[in-house]
């Protein structure tokens, strides 16, 4: 009955009839587990299947030096919508339709915001006298400061700069290549 009640609310599991769920219930042991409690200890061996009906379950490993290492975490099936959609037969190219519609709406909002940008009102412009005064003040402060580029704007591309550009450019190019490969499969 518990499985029927909880899976009856699940979007992708409610299509199972009561007989199918009753047959499944024979293979489950139901337990309510308090927080931070071990269900399967690290020393236990065998095959285990844990179905999370509500809440979250995590797989931790106790390291020899006493630290807990989080290996995996699973949430309620509603969080795992992608896997449920695949199991329900939704084609892979339709999995992210909602996400793409949201992104498209954000782009349209951005386009509208860009179209709403107007030139600055002339009442906020500086007069020619104010600009000349500001430039004169800047020239005086520039004369007092120490000259030099301090390493910026020397020009050219030395070995060190090329190595750093490669450090950034190669992973970026690889990411773009992988994205294009994935995009070609969709279309």
Image (cartoon, helix red, strand yellow):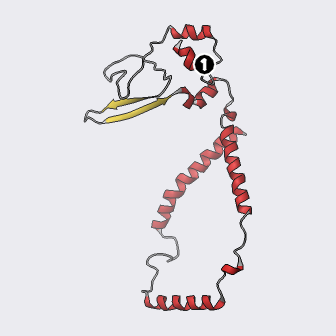
185 or 3, nearer to the observer: 3
For disc 1, the marked residue is 8
Residue at x 57% of width, y 49% of height: 175
Q: Residues within 10 Å of mark 1 (few under 14, many from 20)?
A: some
Residue 185 drawn above or below residue 58:
below
User: Residue at 64% of width from left, 12% of height from top?
Assistant: 17
Please count the marks in the image.
1
Q: Position of residue 115 (x, y in %)?
A: 74, 62
92 and 31: which one is in front? 31
Q: Position of residue 169 (x, y in %)?
A: 54, 57
Residue that protrudes farthest toward the left in the picture: 65
**Quadrant the C terminus occupies:** top right
Can you give x and y, in whole percent of width and height, for residue 133 in the image? Answer: 57, 91
**Above or below, comparing residue 42 to residue 104 in the picture:** above
Residue 77, quarter of picture: top right
- What is the quadrant of the N terminus in the image? top right
Q: Residue furthest front?
A: 123
Residue located 67% across and 47% down the image: 103
Would you place residue 143 above or below residue 19 in this image? below
Q: Tag 1's secondary structure?
A: loop
Q: Is residue 122 above or below residue 9?
A: below
Give the residue displayed 49% in from the left and 25% down from the top.
Answer: 54
Query: Residue 20: x and y, percent?
Result: 60, 10
Looking at the image, which is closer to me, 138 or 47? 138
Q: Quadrant of residue 69?
A: top left
């Amino acid at each position: 009955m518990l499985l029927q009640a909880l899976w009856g609310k699940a979007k992708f599991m409610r299509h199972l009839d009561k007989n199918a769920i009753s047959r499944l219930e024979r293979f489950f042991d139901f337990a309510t587990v308090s927080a931070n409690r071990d269900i399967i200890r690290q020393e236990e061996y065998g095959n285990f299947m844990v179905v999370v009906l509500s809440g979250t379950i995590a797989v931790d490993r106790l390291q020899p030096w006493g630290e807990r290492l989080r290996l995996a975490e699973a949430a309620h099936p509603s969080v795992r919508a992608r896997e449920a959609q695949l199991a329900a037969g939704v084609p892979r190219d339709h999995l992210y339709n909602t996400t793409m519609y949201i992104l498209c709406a954000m782009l349209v909002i951005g386009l509208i915001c860009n179209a709403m940008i107007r030139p600055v009102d002339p009442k906020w412009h500086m007069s020619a006298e104010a600009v000349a005064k500001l430039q004169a003040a800047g020239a005086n402060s520039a004369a007092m400061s120490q000259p030099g580029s301090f390493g910026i704007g020397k020009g050219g591309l030395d070995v060190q700069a090329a190595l750093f550009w490669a450090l950034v450019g190669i992973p970026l190019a690889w990411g773009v290549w992988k994205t294009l490969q994935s995009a070609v499969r969709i279309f």
